[in-house]
Image (cartoon, helix red, strand yellow):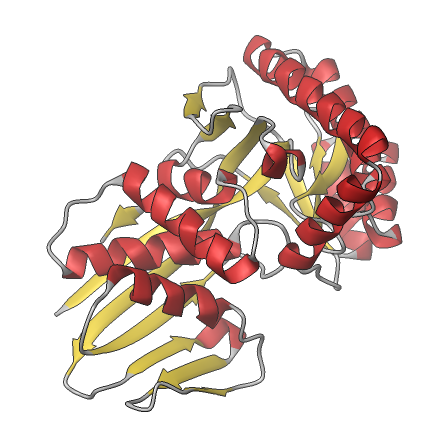
Amino acid sequence: MRAVAKAPGKIILFGEHAVVFGKPALAMAVNCQARVEIRRVEEEHIQITVPSLDVTGTIKGDGVLECSGTGKQGILNYILQSIQLAELEGGLEVHVELEIPIGAGMGSSAAVTVATLAALAKLEGQALDRGLLAQQAHQVEQLVQGAASPLDTAVSAYGGLVHLNRDGEVENLEVPGPLPLVVACTSSRGNTGELVAGVRRKRSHYPGVVDPILEAMEQITIQARKALLDGEKEVVGGLMNINHGLLDALGVNTMELSTMAYQARAAGALGSKITGAGGGGAIIAYAPEHFDAVLSKLREEEEAFPVELSIVGVELE
């Protein structure tokens, strides 16, 4: 028996880090995917292979995870936690095809987790339930990272442009026209769990300073939602630039990220900001005008590519 599922990555437009503290956020699924194939096998082992990362992990009867390959092994933890949550018994072989950059703030772990849970559910004969998958995947991310917002997993599960409100409710938005966005990734990558924990520590040390920053981020997200729906491009760009500055104030910025953000603006982007946890990773540049110039400039320095909205969330093959 086999099951295959795929789920999209994401970029956060507004509200990263603030969303961990119950603030709203805006994010969109993008046309980069994680595809997970799971087979039942007679051997009493769990074997996970991620060729694009050159990583293989195997658990045999003794319960010890043995890893091989040269790539980062952290992604294996999300898959193993998903299998444990699903409570599947017997041997399994898991094959992962990953188009999403690891550690770039584009939801690679969420996409892999959502796709893994969807494939496991299919093996058990269960119908695709995006709401349940989003909840379960969030639970997995919390177990692995220690703290996580429900945003990444909701976007991978549902697809489209997603608004997450203060109560954790997901709303899919329809935006008039395309969102011309460029993603640029630094060669260094941040650790999401460590960065989220660092902001939490800063808030506990300086609540009178950090709480107003988080409240300002909330107002940015509220105004950005309206601006996106109304097609107010200048407002969207301006709010992105303010959001980037506030993320810098929270200590999740780097010189490389800011350099790219300012280069994008100099080339004609209306707005640019960190997307995701920061500490390395990626920025997004909003360029309804001068798109090619912005893309070309960012490619001079780092890996950069255009992204498009993915309407479809997790799906079964």
Question: Which sits in the foreground, 274 or 286?
Answer: 274
- Residue 279 versus residue 57 in the image, above or below: above
* Res 313 visible: no
Q: Quadrant of residue 171?
A: top left
Q: Is residue 44 left or right of residue 287?
A: left
Residue 188 pos. (x, y %) = 75, 64
Q: In which quarter of the image is the N terminus?
A: bottom left
In the image, is 45 to the left or to the right of 75?
Answer: left
Question: In this orientation, which residue lies closer to the viewer: 15 or 282?
Answer: 15
125 or 290: nearer the viewer? 125
Corner quadrant of residue 51:
bottom left
Q: Residue at x 65, y 38 (%)?
A: 16
Residue 287: x %, y % from top left:
71, 29
Residue found at x 31% / y 46% = 133
Q: In which quarter of the image is residue 178?
A: top right
Q: In the picture shown, does residue 97 fall above or below 107?
A: below
In the image, is 194 to the left or to the right of 176?
Answer: right
Residue drawn at 37 percent across, 85 percent down: 58
> Looking at the picture, how far across and down is residue 103, in whole percent?
62, 59
Q: Do we see residue 283 in this rendering? A: yes
Above or below, 168 against 141 in this view is: above
